[in-house]
Image (cartoon, grey):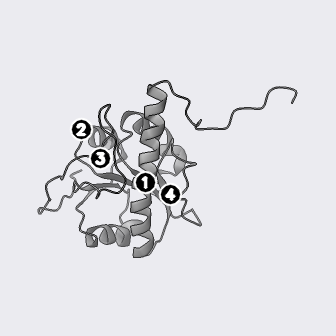
Amino acid sequence: MNIELLMNRMPSDGPLMLKAHRTPAPGLPLRLDPVLVFAAETAPVTYEIETIRHLGRDVALCPDLRRFNNLVGSPSRAWSMLFIEIEGFGGIASVLEKLRILRLERPDLPVVMASTRMRVHDLSVERLPVCDVSLALPADAADVNVVLQKARVNNFAWQMRQMNMVEGEVAVPDQPPLLAQGA
């Protein structure tokens, strides 16, 4: 299936990627590269896509999860953010491993996980190994805007966590340690 890209794509104003010699700044504007939206059906996310476009962002839409690895990994800077509506692909169990691998391979790419089964948005850092934020659908324009901004802030925390792990510093674990047996 083809990906829909708006023809008036704006040039990138530079990456917010974490590199060994550069620290990303969450206060900088989001890159102007398109937001990649994975949604099996556009109906659950039509309003959210239009909100992203209204915020001045181009959107690339892909309904085929089989193209996930090709699209998010090549070219490495083609996307400023990944937005994935998980219910159309079978729920969290169907996308969990793809997102976990993506988070390790592309810690610089903010990820918004959207679902019609969530009751509230999750803007905490508890799900960082999978996504930067979770968006409960449907959402209004103000919520989408807040979620996009918080995804960048949380992504910065994820990048710092990954950098600390690479450099051998003590990092906050992704999951709490198991209790010792017999405790």
Residue placed under numbered mark 3 in the picture? 16
- Count neighbours of disc 1 (C-alpha within 10 A) and say few if under 14, some if 14 to 19, many if 20 or more: some
Tag 3: amino acid? Leu
- Neighbour tally class for label 4: few under 14, some 14-19, many 20 plus, Cα within 10 Å: many
Q: Earlier in the sequence, mark 4 or mark 3?
A: 3
Camera-side residue: 122 or 101?
A: 122
In front of the other: 106 or 171: 171
Q: Earlier in the sequence, mark 4 or mark 2?
A: 2
Task: Point out the frontmost of discs 3 and 2.
Answer: 3
Location of mark 1 (residue): 153
Q: Which residue is mark 4?
A: 134
**Residue 36, horizontal then vertical, whole percent:** 30, 53
Q: Is residue 123 above or below residue 52?
A: above
Q: Is residue 62 visible?
A: no
Indicate the amino acid at tag 1: Val
CA separation in Å, label 3 and label 2:
17 Å
> In the rendering, which numbered label is found on residue 23?
none
Whole-angstrom CA distance, mark 1 to mark 3, is 11 Å
Q: Nearer the viewer, mark 4 or mark 1?
A: 1
N-term mark: 4 or 1: 4
The CA span between labels 2 and 1 is: 24 Å
Residue at left offset 36%, top offset 46%: 65
Residue 42 appears in the figure:
yes
Q: Which mark is residue 74?
A: 2
Kindly state the secondary structure of the residue where label 3 is placed: loop
How far apart are the two marked residues, 4 and 1, measured between alpha carbons? Answer: 13 Å
Which of the two discs, 1 and 3, labels the residue nearer the N terminus? 3
Q: CA distance from mark 4 to mark 2?
A: 24 Å
Residue 161 position (above or below residue 58): above
Disc 4 residue type (three-letter): Ser
Quadrant of the image for the C terminus?
Answer: top right
Sequence order check: which comes first, mark 2 or mark 1? 2
